[in-house]
Image (cartoon, rainbow, N blue to C red):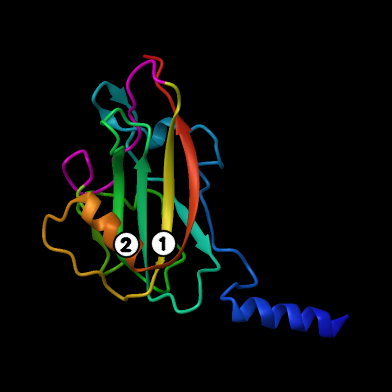
Amino acid sequence: MKHISLGLTLALAALGVQAGDFTLVSPQIKPQGMINAQQVYNGFGCTGENVSPALEWKNPPPGTKSFAVLVHDPDAPTGGSGWWHWLVINLPAGASGLPLAAGKADGSALPAGAVQINTDFGGPGWGGPCPPVGDKAHRYHFTVYAMKLEKLELPAGASAALAGFMVNANSLGKATLTGLYARSK
C-alpha cells in the first residue's frame, strides 16, 4: 500500500499538483455567504463602514514569488465589465494573508512593497460592495493569485483591467472566495 501511495504522490508531483489545495478564507466572509455591513461601501447611498475583510491563504503553488489580491463584482451593471473593488499587487512571497482593514487608501496597513491599483471607485484601496437597490445579490469574487514574478511592473495610473491582465498572465495558480451582497434600500 505504501508503494501505491508513494507512486500516486510522485505522479501528482510530476503533474504539478501539490498535496494541499491553494485556498482562501476570511473570518468575515463565509463562502457564498452575505457580506457584513462592516465591509460595505460608505457612499453612493450605502452606509457601511468600508473596512476590507481579513484574508488568509495557504498551500500556494511551488515557485510562488509574490501574491496579488483582486476583488471583482461581475454582476455590476456596467455593460459587461463588472466592478473592481480592490487590487493589491506585489505582496511578498512570505505573506499568508492580509489583516482586517488592510485596504486603507494610503497603503499603510499593507506589507512593504505592496501596491494598490485604482479601483472603479476612482482611487486605490478597498471599496466595499454597494450594488443598486433592488438588484439580486451580487457576487464578490475575492481572488488571491500566486505569482511567478517577485514584482509586477505596471505604469503609474494603470487601469484595473491592465492590472488584471498582467496578474493573470503571470499567475501560477489562484484561490477564490465568493461573498454575496444585496441592498434593499
Query: Residue 125, how many percent across, how many down?
Result: 25, 48
The residues colored magenta run 119-135
Q: Residue at x 68, y 83 (%)?
A: 10
Q: Nearer the viewer, residue 180 or 110?
A: 180
* Residue carrying label 1: 145
Assign the magenta stretch its main secondary structure: loop
> Left of 8 or right of it: where is 57?
left
Along the line of sight, which residue is nearer the eye, 54 or 92?
92
Rendered location of residue 43, percent (x, y): 24, 27
* In magenta segment, residue 137: no
Residue 129 location, quadrant: top left
The residue closer to the viewer here, 52 or 59, is 59
Residue 57 position in % (x across, y down)? 50, 61
Work out how far the residue at label 2 is from the one at label 1, CA to CA, in angstroms.
7 Å
Quick one: SS at disc 2?
helix
Q: Quadrant of residue 76?
A: top left
Q: Eyeballing the image, is 114 above or below 1? A: above
Residue 7 placement (x, y as % from top left): 75, 83
Q: Which residue is mark 2?
A: 167
Secondary structure, mark 1, is strand
Which residue is situated farthest in the right direction here? Answer: 1
Is residue 130 visible in this depiction of the protein?
Answer: yes
